Image (cartoon, helix red, strand yellow):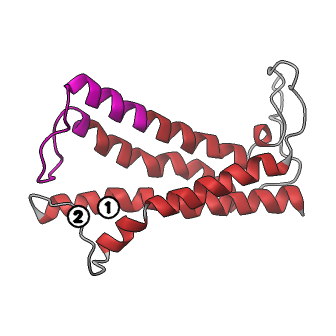
Amino acid sequence: MTVPAPTTERPVPPWATRIARLLPWLALPVCLWRLPIGFGYTMGLDLGPMPGPVWAGVLYVGTLSLLTELFALACRGLVSRWGETVPAWVPRLGGRRIPPMAVIVPATVAGLGLMYLFVDWWLAVFRVEGWAAGPYDTVWWQILADTVSALFVTWGPLVLALTYGYWRRRCR
């Protein structure tokens, strides 16, 4: 006998579910792009390898990539039951309703923060005067870096879109 999965209080729009499932995949290319940098390979950047021992670079880049993916997976809470009610296994709080603003405020700050973080990328890619991308060995490395980064840059607006969908479901 199968038990039906718990659902959200109100139906989640299909677009929101698709975006929430897509976010970890959008972050994955940049996470994979970072890993060789931790091992000292510059990925076409005309710069020296990371300073310090290799293990420190690997630890830093690996941790950054892991946290990035965990945050992308946490965005699933904006379309899932566990983003509305504390899971039953949590001591003393299990089963309680999560106040909508306890989710909306951090998600909005995160989405806006991501957009702020990537302003310089936009300015460099579109060659706004005074802004330039990193010095790459070849144009192909530049194209690859821009493509990988472009996927990641969509993250901020998509988190804000998910937050808006969450707000509409929980607050209206």
**Residue, x 78% and y 55% (percent of image)?**
12
Q: Is residue 12 above or below residue 90?
A: below
45 or 21: nearer the viewer:
45
Residue 22 is situated, as x and y percent measured from the top left of the image, at 54, 52
Answer yes or no: do the residues labelled 1 and 2 have beta carbons within 8 Å? yes
Report the amino acid beneath label 2: Ile
Residue 53 left/right relative to 60: left
Q: Is residue 82 left or right of residue 144?
A: right
Q: Residue at x 24, y 70 (%)?
A: 132
The reply, left or right, for residue 50 in relation to residue 138 is: right
Residue 122 colored magenta? no
Q: Quadrant of the N terminus?
A: top right
Query: Vertical placement of 10 versus 42: above or below?
Result: below
Q: Report which residue position mark 1 lands on.
A: 147
Cα distance, mark 1 to mark 2?
6 Å
Return the mark for residue 143. Answer: 2
Residue 145: % across, % down: 26, 57
Percent position of residue 120, x then y: 37, 66
Q: Is residue 7 visible?
A: yes
Foreground: 22 or 167? 167
Q: Write the start and end of the magenta stretch as one range.
A: 36-65
Is residue 18 something that shows in the picture?
no
* Magenta highlight on residue 37: yes
Element on which disc 2 rests: helix
Report the disc number at residue 64.
none
Identity of the residue drawn at 59% across and 57% down: 111
Query: What is the number of callouts on the image?
Result: 2
Q: Residues within 10 Å of mark 2 (few under 14, many from 20)?
A: few
Query: Which residue lies at the image location 36% right of the left edge and 48% below the top edge?
Result: 30
Q: Quadrant of residue 125?
A: bottom left
Q: Is residue 17 left or right of residue 72?
A: right
Q: Residue 117: where, in percent of width, then height? A: 45, 58
